[in-house]
Protein backbone atom coordinates (compact mmCIF):
# COMPACT_ATOMS: atom_id res chain seq x y z
CA UNK A 1 0.00 0.00 0.00
CA UNK A 2 1.30 3.40 -0.94
CA UNK A 3 0.45 6.72 0.62
CA UNK A 4 0.29 9.77 -1.63
CA UNK A 5 2.64 12.63 -0.89
CA UNK A 6 0.42 15.73 -0.83
CA UNK A 7 3.10 18.05 0.52
CA UNK A 8 3.52 19.75 -2.87
CA UNK A 9 -0.16 20.69 -3.24
CA UNK A 10 -0.95 24.40 -2.87
CA UNK A 11 -1.93 25.56 0.62
CA UNK A 12 -5.43 26.47 -0.52
CA UNK A 13 -6.00 23.17 -2.38
CA UNK A 14 -9.63 22.06 -2.27
CA UNK A 15 -10.28 18.33 -2.40
CA UNK A 16 -13.39 17.45 -4.39
CA UNK A 17 -16.38 16.30 -2.40
CA UNK A 18 -18.36 13.19 -3.37
CA UNK A 19 -22.12 13.75 -3.05
CA UNK A 20 -25.24 11.61 -3.05
CA UNK A 21 -28.35 13.18 -4.57
CA UNK A 22 -31.80 12.18 -5.83
CA UNK A 23 -32.73 12.04 -9.52
CA UNK A 24 -35.60 13.96 -11.12
CA UNK A 25 -37.95 11.03 -10.39
CA UNK A 26 -37.53 11.86 -6.66
CA UNK A 27 -36.57 8.28 -5.78
CA UNK A 28 -33.44 7.11 -7.61
CA UNK A 29 -30.09 7.80 -5.95
CA UNK A 30 -27.54 9.54 -8.16
CA UNK A 31 -23.95 10.43 -7.36
CA UNK A 32 -21.62 13.26 -8.16
CA UNK A 33 -18.49 15.17 -7.25
CA UNK A 34 -18.19 18.88 -6.37
CA UNK A 35 -14.96 20.78 -7.08
CA UNK A 36 -14.38 24.11 -5.34
CA UNK A 37 -11.86 26.79 -6.36
CA UNK A 38 -8.60 27.40 -4.51
CA UNK A 39 -9.14 30.04 -1.85
CA UNK A 40 -12.80 29.03 -1.64
CA UNK A 41 -14.98 31.03 0.76
CA UNK A 42 -18.56 30.05 1.61
CA UNK A 43 -19.31 33.78 2.00
CA UNK A 44 -18.90 34.37 -1.75
CA UNK A 45 -21.26 33.50 -4.59
CA UNK A 46 -19.91 31.22 -7.32
CA UNK A 47 -21.14 30.40 -10.82
CA UNK A 48 -21.62 26.68 -11.51
CA UNK A 49 -20.20 24.57 -14.31
CA UNK A 50 -21.91 21.26 -15.02
CA UNK A 51 -18.86 19.39 -16.30
CA UNK A 52 -20.19 16.59 -18.44
CA UNK A 53 -18.19 13.57 -19.57
CA UNK A 54 -20.20 10.47 -18.76
CA UNK A 55 -22.59 8.97 -21.26
CA UNK A 56 -24.34 5.72 -22.01
CA UNK A 57 -21.08 3.95 -22.88
CA UNK A 58 -18.78 5.20 -20.17
CA UNK A 59 -18.66 6.41 -16.58
CA UNK A 60 -16.17 9.21 -16.09
CA UNK A 61 -17.11 10.24 -12.57
CA UNK A 62 -13.94 10.40 -10.45
CA UNK A 63 -13.90 7.58 -7.94
CA UNK A 64 -11.02 8.98 -5.92
CA UNK A 65 -8.10 11.35 -6.16
CA UNK A 66 -6.29 11.90 -9.43
CA UNK A 67 -5.70 8.81 -11.59
CA UNK A 68 -8.47 6.25 -11.22
CA UNK A 69 -11.22 6.86 -13.73
CA UNK A 70 -11.84 5.99 -17.38
CA UNK A 71 -9.22 8.32 -18.84
CA UNK A 72 -6.70 8.62 -16.04
CA UNK A 73 -6.43 12.06 -14.54
CA UNK A 74 -7.45 14.07 -17.63
CA UNK A 75 -11.07 14.51 -16.53
CA UNK A 76 -10.23 15.06 -12.86
CA UNK A 77 -7.59 17.68 -13.64
CA UNK A 78 -9.78 19.42 -16.22
CA UNK A 79 -12.56 19.79 -13.64
CA UNK A 80 -10.03 20.98 -11.07
CA UNK A 81 -8.69 23.46 -13.63
CA UNK A 82 -12.15 24.90 -14.26
CA UNK A 83 -12.63 25.25 -10.51
CA UNK A 84 -9.31 27.11 -10.33
CA UNK A 85 -10.85 29.70 -12.67
CA UNK A 86 -13.40 30.52 -9.97
CA UNK A 87 -16.27 28.12 -10.65
CA UNK A 88 -17.98 25.51 -8.56
CA UNK A 89 -17.68 22.50 -10.86
CA UNK A 90 -20.11 19.63 -10.50
CA UNK A 91 -19.97 16.24 -12.18
CA UNK A 92 -23.18 14.25 -11.73
CA UNK A 93 -24.09 10.92 -13.28
CA UNK A 94 -27.79 10.73 -13.98
CA UNK A 95 -29.86 7.91 -15.36
CA UNK A 96 -28.66 6.65 -18.71
CA UNK A 97 -25.08 5.97 -17.58
CA UNK A 98 -23.48 2.54 -17.01
CA UNK A 99 -22.31 0.65 -13.91
CA UNK A 100 -25.77 0.53 -12.34
CA UNK A 101 -28.80 -1.73 -12.87
CA UNK A 102 -30.46 -2.18 -16.28
CA UNK A 103 -33.32 0.23 -15.56
CA UNK A 104 -30.79 2.96 -14.71
CA UNK A 105 -28.53 2.26 -17.69
CA UNK A 106 -31.28 1.88 -20.29
CA UNK A 107 -33.30 4.90 -19.13
CA UNK A 108 -34.83 6.35 -22.36
CA UNK A 109 -32.61 4.04 -24.42
CA UNK A 110 -32.34 5.13 -28.06
CA UNK A 111 -32.74 8.83 -27.31
CA UNK A 112 -29.27 10.38 -27.07
CA UNK A 113 -30.61 13.41 -25.19
CA UNK A 114 -31.26 11.12 -22.20
CA UNK A 115 -27.76 9.67 -21.94
CA UNK A 116 -26.75 11.02 -18.52
CA UNK A 117 -30.20 12.58 -18.11
CA UNK A 118 -30.05 16.36 -17.88
CA UNK A 119 -33.21 16.42 -15.75
CA UNK A 120 -31.35 14.36 -13.13
CA UNK A 121 -28.31 16.61 -13.27
CA UNK A 122 -30.41 19.77 -13.05
CA UNK A 123 -32.27 18.28 -10.08
CA UNK A 124 -28.92 17.44 -8.48
CA UNK A 125 -27.52 20.93 -9.03
CA UNK A 126 -30.64 22.47 -7.49
CA UNK A 127 -30.28 20.18 -4.46
CA UNK A 128 -26.63 21.20 -4.12
CA UNK A 129 -27.55 24.90 -4.35
CA UNK A 130 -30.00 24.43 -1.47
CA UNK A 131 -27.34 22.60 0.53
CA UNK A 132 -24.62 25.14 -0.36
CA UNK A 133 -26.02 28.70 -0.67
CA UNK A 134 -22.75 29.94 -2.23
CA UNK A 135 -23.67 28.06 -5.43
CA UNK A 136 -25.45 30.52 -7.75
CA UNK A 137 -28.12 28.47 -9.54
CA UNK A 138 -28.89 31.52 -11.73
CA UNK A 139 -25.42 31.27 -13.32
CA UNK A 140 -25.07 27.70 -14.57
CA UNK A 141 -23.11 26.70 -17.64
CA UNK A 142 -22.26 23.36 -19.12
CA UNK A 143 -18.90 22.25 -20.41
CA UNK A 144 -18.69 18.95 -22.21
CA UNK A 145 -16.48 16.86 -24.41
CA UNK A 146 -16.84 16.35 -28.12
CA UNK A 147 -19.00 13.26 -27.70
CA UNK A 148 -22.40 13.20 -29.36
CA UNK A 149 -24.71 13.14 -26.36
CA UNK A 150 -23.41 15.88 -24.15
CA UNK A 151 -23.77 19.65 -23.68
CA UNK A 152 -25.58 20.55 -26.88
CA UNK A 153 -28.70 18.65 -25.76
CA UNK A 154 -28.49 20.41 -22.40
CA UNK A 155 -28.44 23.94 -23.74
CA UNK A 156 -31.10 23.25 -26.42
CA UNK A 157 -33.48 21.27 -24.21
CA UNK A 158 -32.97 23.27 -21.00
CA UNK A 159 -32.21 26.88 -22.03
CA UNK A 160 -34.06 28.15 -18.97
CA UNK A 161 -31.43 26.50 -16.74
CA UNK A 162 -28.14 26.53 -18.65
CA UNK A 163 -26.90 29.98 -19.65
CA UNK A 164 -23.92 28.90 -21.75
CA UNK A 165 -22.46 25.74 -23.27
CA UNK A 166 -18.83 25.17 -24.17
CA UNK A 167 -17.91 22.05 -26.14
CA UNK A 168 -14.29 20.98 -26.24
CA UNK A 169 -12.04 18.38 -27.72
CA UNK A 170 -9.03 17.32 -25.71
CA UNK A 171 -7.22 15.85 -28.64
CA UNK A 172 -6.64 16.83 -32.23
CA UNK A 173 -8.85 14.62 -34.41
CA UNK A 174 -6.37 14.94 -37.30
CA UNK A 175 -3.93 12.73 -35.41
CA UNK A 176 -6.31 10.07 -34.07
CA UNK A 177 -5.89 7.58 -36.93
CA UNK A 178 -2.12 8.06 -37.11
CA UNK A 179 -1.73 7.50 -33.39
CA UNK A 180 -4.06 4.46 -33.44
CA UNK A 181 -2.06 2.92 -36.30
CA UNK A 182 1.14 3.46 -34.36
CA UNK A 183 -0.41 2.01 -31.20
CA UNK A 184 -1.81 -1.01 -33.03
CA UNK A 185 1.53 -1.56 -34.73
CA UNK A 186 3.22 -1.69 -31.31
CA UNK A 187 0.56 -3.95 -29.83
CA UNK A 188 0.50 -6.40 -32.75
CA UNK A 189 4.26 -6.51 -33.20
CA UNK A 190 5.72 -10.05 -33.33
Image (tube, rainbow, N blue to C red):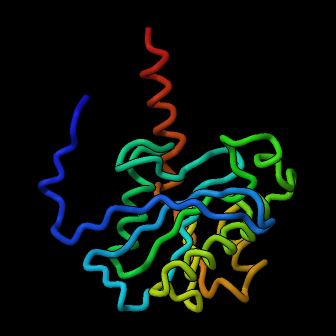
Q: Position of residue 144 (x, y in %)?
A: 57, 66
| Residue 75 horizontal side relative to residue 84, left or right | right
Residue 119: quadrant of the picture: bottom right
Q: Is residue 177 above or below residue 55?
A: above
Spot the residue most to the left: 7
Q: Is residue 108 above or below residue 67?
A: below
Q: Nearer the viewer, residue 40 or 83?
A: 40
State the residue at coordinates (38%, 73%). Answer: 36
Q: Nearer the viewer, residue 187 or 29?
A: 29
Q: Position of residue 103 (x, y in %)?
A: 83, 46
| Residue 167 horizontal side relative to residue 122, left or right | left
Q: Nearer the viewer, residue 95 or 30?
A: 30
State the residue at coordinates (24%, 67%). Answer: 13
Q: Classify the position of the C terminus by image quarter.
A: top left
Q: Nearer the viewer, residue 138 or 22?
A: 22
Q: Position of residue 59 (x, y in %)?
A: 60, 47
Q: Classify the position of the N terminus by image quarter.
A: top left
State the residue at coordinates (49%, 16%). Answer: 188
Looking at the rendered structure, the number of numbered marks drawn on it comes to: 0
Q: Is residue 167 above or below residue 180?
A: below
Q: Position of residue 171 (x, y in %)?
A: 47, 55
| Residue 50 horizontal side relative to residue 160, left or right | left
Residue 99: quadrant of the picture: top right
State the residue at coordinates (68%, 85%). Answer: 161
Amino acid sequence: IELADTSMLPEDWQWPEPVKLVSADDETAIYGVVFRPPGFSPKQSYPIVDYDWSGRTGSCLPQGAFVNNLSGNEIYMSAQGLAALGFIVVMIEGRGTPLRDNAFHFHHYGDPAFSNDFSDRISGIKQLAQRYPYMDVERVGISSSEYLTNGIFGIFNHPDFYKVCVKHSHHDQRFVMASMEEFLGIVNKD
